[in-house]
Amino acid sequence: MNTILVPTDFSDCANYASDFAAQLAQQEKAELCFIHVVEIPNSEAEYYLNQTMVKGMMSEAEQK
């Protein structure tokens, strides 16, 4: 095992999984690679992501 991919949304469950992955990576001398996962809000109206919304999500993820 060389690399462990860790998806996260910064929730408590994801943080627990990240801690577990870090322990496993240390044990196996593997590299951690994180991917930030976001949930797209759902509404009855037609919804799409625009550049401003994406930049906002990226900024929030960087802060976390």
Image: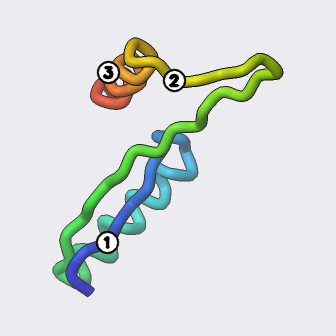
Q: Which residue is mark 2?
A: 49
How many marks can you see? 3
Tell us which disc is closer to us: 3 or 2.
2
Sequence-wise first label, 3 or 1: 1
Q: Secondary structure at mark 2?
A: loop
Tell us which disc is closer to us: 2 or 1.
2
Query: Could you tell me residue 52's position as x and y percent?
Result: 40, 12
Residue type (three-letter) at the residue carrying disc 3:
Ser
Residue drawn where x is 72% and y is 28% of the image: 42
Residue drawn where x is 38% and y is 18% of the image: 51
Residue type (three-letter) at the residue carrying disc 1:
Ile
Tag of residue 63:
none
Residue drawn where x is 47% and y is 60% of the image: 17
Residue at the farthest top position? 52
Q: Is residue 40 left or right of residue 16?
A: right
Q: Is residue 56 left or right of residue 47?
A: left
Query: Could you tell me residue 35's position as x and y percent?
Result: 36, 51
Q: Which residue is mark 3?
A: 59
Q: Which residue is mark 1?
A: 4
Sequence-wise first label, 2 or 1: 1
Q: Is residue 47 left or right of residue 49?
A: right
